[in-house]
Image: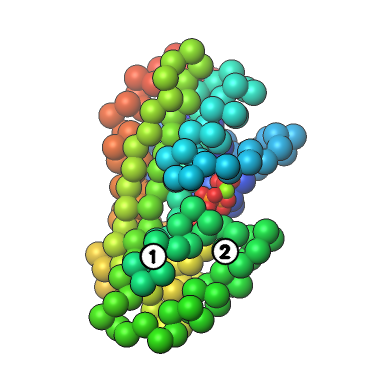
């Protein structure tokens, strides 16, 4: 079983990666397992740019293949906000409840027909001595008028997932892991994984 390092400190993402990698036969480690590694500053202007920054910084530190996820919610009526600022939309402390309240407030007067939004996920794969590459996934939906459901993390309670006809936070973790932006991006990496990690086997 190969051990895959994901450069994230987000516990919600970490759980989703563990769940998605398990059936593929891989064990996941995240930065929650490496508390000595400092936060990588997200100074990029795109999900892709930030994912590359995080993956390369941690790959250089550990001299291992590292995958990073940069993701967020883009709302049409808010011209794509919160976008790359999703984690910190209401302030530096990354508070999911305050972030959702801010969005609900900004969307108060937006009619039902204009509430389209989508989650984006960029995954960057940094390989020592090779060019970093990225894959992307999206998940389409609409912004609800109030929070619904208690699964997931981030904006899941105010995101109506078109593919499932329910709030993202009403989906069981296995269901979210089939249709999410993160799952859609990871699917594009699946074929590469066996080759990528064949030289990184751990007992
Ligand atoms: O409802 C949600 N369901 C999701 O599936 C999801 N994926 C991302 N997000 C939002 O986008 C931010 C990522 O920002 P982000 O990529 O910089 O990650 P982060 O700062 O939380 O951790 P790290 O991975 O950088 O360590 C997160 O905090 C969330 O607010 C999601 N919200
Ligand atoms: Mg971040």
Q: Nearer the viewer, residue 177 or 106?
A: 106
Residue on which disc 1 sits = 79
Which residue sits at x=34%, y=43%?
136
Which residue sits at x=44%, y=74%?
158
Could you tell me how many numbered marks the image carries? Answer: 2
Assess disc 1: are there few (<14), some (14-19) or many (≥20) residues with their C-alpha within 10 Å of its C-alpha.
Answer: few
Q: Nearer the viewer, residue 76 or 166?
A: 76
Apparent side of residue 30 relative to residue 121 in the rendered image (left or right): right
Residue on which disc 2 sits = 89
Q: From what the image shows, is residue 109 above or below residue 44?
A: below
Apparent side of residue 71 relative to residue 7 in the rendered image (left or right): left
Assess disc 2: are there few (<14), some (14-19) or many (≥20) residues with their C-alpha within 10 Å of its C-alpha.
Answer: many
Location of residue 168 by image quarter:
bottom left
Location of residue 180 by image quarter:
bottom left
Identify the secondary structure beneath mark 2. loop
Which residue sits at x=48%, y=33%?
52
Which residue sits at x=32%, y=53%?
138
User: In which quadrant is the C terminus drawn?
Assistant: top right
Identify the secondary structure beneath mark 1. loop
Percent across and percent down for residue 174 are 38, 57
Percent across and percent down for residue 160 are 35, 72
């Amino acid at each position: 079983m190969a051990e895959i390092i994901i450069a994230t400190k987000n516990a919600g993402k970490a759980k989703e990666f563990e769940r998605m990698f398990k059936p593929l036969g891989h064990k996941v480690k995240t930065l929650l397992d490496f508390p000595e590694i400092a936060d990588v500053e997200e100074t990029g202007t795109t999900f892709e740019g930030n994912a590359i920054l995080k993956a390369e910084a941690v790959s250089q530190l550990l001299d291992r293949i590292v995958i990073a996820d940069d993701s967020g919610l883009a709302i049409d009526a808010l011209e794509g906000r919160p976008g790359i600022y999703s984690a910190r939309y209401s302030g530096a402390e990354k508070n999911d409840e305050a972030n959702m309240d801010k969005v609900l407030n900004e969307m108060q007067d937006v009619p039902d027909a204009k509430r389209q939004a989508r989650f984006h996920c960029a995954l960057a794969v940094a390989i020592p001595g090779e060019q970093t590459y990225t894959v992307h996934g999206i998940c389409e939906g609409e912004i609800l008028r109030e929070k619904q459901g208690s699964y997931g993390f981030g904006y899941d309670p105010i995101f109506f997932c078109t593919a499932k006809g329910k709030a993202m936070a009403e989906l069981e973790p296995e269901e979210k892991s089939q249709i999410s932006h993160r799952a859609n991006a990871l699917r594009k990496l699946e074929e590469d994984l066996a080759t990528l990690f064949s030289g990184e086997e751990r007992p």
